[in-house]
Amino acid sequence: MSEPTLQLTPPQFDRLRRLIEERAGIYCPDARASVLQRALATRMHLCGATDWERYQRLLASTGDAELRQLLRYITVSETSFFRIPSQFEALRRVLVPTITGSAPAGTLNVWSAGCSTGEEPYSIAITLAEMGTVLRPWQVHLLATDVSAAAIEHARAGRYGERALRGVPRGCRARYFGRCADGRPPGAAEHEISPAVRRRVRFEEFNLASPRYPEPPPAGWDIIFCRNVTIYFRPRTTRQVIERFREVLRPGGFLVLSPTECLCCISHDFEVIEVVGVFIYVKPPVEAALAGLRPSYVVAHDPPTPTHAHHAAAARLRGDLPCPARSVPPPAAHEQEACSQAIAAATEERWEQAEQMLLPFATEVRAPRARQLLAWVRTMRGAGEQAAALCLELLARDPLAGAAHYVLGLIASRAGELAESEEHFTRAIYSDCGLVPAHYYLGVARCARGDPEGARRAFQGALRALGEPHTGWLDFSEGLTADHWRRACDERLTAIARCH
């Protein structure tokens, strides 16, 4: 088989992306031309189409079947259970009790729109199952949809690898997951969702660009989750999708989006409440009990009075000045080895083992790298108080310990303290402008606080840091490669650009 044509002319590229947007709502800007090109080359090769004209005829003759296959290579389907834990906490603590508190029994109607491979709707189902007596008199109608037939097939199978389960509490693992019993090799889908949870979710193929949405219950949907989907849409498509969500939600119903999806794309027909640090959108009227949850801010706080140091740091963040090298003594050989082993364990989400490897250095002031890693590991496994105490010790000894500020930023972010997290991430960057995750999560915090311009600068700062030779940030990379962080920043920047 000859190699497929890999280079489209500008008119051919425009025709293909218009077709994708018309049928799926997904827009491929010029910045993502290479992504579309690689996806097209892969599908042409697999289909045996040796040139663009043949592939175009295939797209036209197969309805949406081939288009859905092409979309698999354009969108990012990586997800995990309980991604953005605070949103599931908001579901448990506020959203469901508000709905069920209005009647002794009924049907709770939840739609996961853009469910990918099923981790989100299954996380919703587990959260509802964990609520026990609160929902016992209620029926649960949980619909999950995605444009990808392959993703829906994966979701229905309910089988996942270890990485997808990294956010699942140990007790939930025991109650709702089992080991696949068919001799699958290590690294394959090793875990299987329980039949009881699988039966709670109905999966269907659905395209959010369609004019008719899934038939809502008589009163409308109570809750709609649609996270990290509109980042692929242009503003007008996003507004259309949000408007259709508004139409099918019941009065007082809730819309849950990703914190990184820009607030300016949301219809003014929604009101906003803030629950455990995340924004939830409510179709009016807002229940009286929720009135006190309206956020007191939707824009970034005023910056502190500039000093000479702040001006220099701001210049470094803009890229006007190089990041100064800090004189940090190299770690001893035994500390280096322990850190390497702990990072390897953390990459596989073995947090307790990683902590045990670093504990010998917990009080060793001459091992700052190991102590910073220990604070980060404790944060990732949920021991925020211990991690914060260690960070404060590190900062008392070295006020320029950027990694300590970064960990404090993560702790504040998880607690819903967005302003505090932004301050710590900023201080981390002042101290170490090569700390890629600090730039990235600063952007996330600013997005969530309604400061898209500040978020744009932060994500651009992360991209600049990725282009520098610094490697110390890899200690806190969460097992992700530089290419993954780069792609994540590009997607966030694209989402911000679409909102303006």
Image (tube, rainbow, N blue to C red):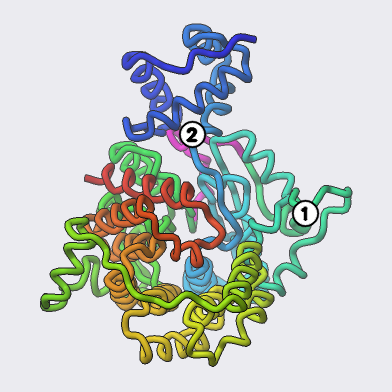
**Lower position in the chain sequence, tag 2 or tag 1:** 2
Q: Identify the magenta region.
A: 204-221
Rendered residue at 37%/19% (across/down): 13
Label 1: how many residues lie within 10 Å, few (<14), some (14-19) or many (20+)? Answer: some
Q: Which residue is mark 1?
A: 190
**Residue 143 pos. (x, y %):** 59, 48
Dot 1 lies on which element?
A: loop
Which residue occupies the foreground of this view, 462 or 271? 462
Answer yes or no: is residue 226 visible: no
Residue 249 visible in this rendered orientation of the protein: yes
Q: Is residue 218 magenta?
A: yes
Which residue is at a point 88% across and 48% down the rendered structure image? Answer: 182
- The quadrant holding residue 235 is top left
Horizontal side of residue 382 vs 432, given as left or right: right
- Which element carries disc 2, helix, strand or loop? loop
User: Compared to 10, does 464 lie above or below?
Assistant: below
Q: Residue 72's image quarter? A: top right
| Residue 150 position in % (x across, y down) | 64, 35
The crowding category of the residue bearing disc 2, from other C-alpha atoms within 10 Å (few below 14, some 14 to 19, many at least 20), is: some
The amino acid type, in three-letter code, at marker 2 is Ile
Q: Main secondary structure of the magenta part?
A: loop
Kindly identify the residue that appears in the image at 37 percent across and 17 percent down: 15
Relative side of 72 to 449, left or right = right
Q: Which residue is mark 2?
A: 74
Q: How many marks?
A: 2
How far across and down, in percent of the image, does residue 66 sit? 57, 21
| Distance of label 2 from label 1 (alpha carbons) | 26 Å
Horizontally, residue 99 falls left or right of residue 141, namely left
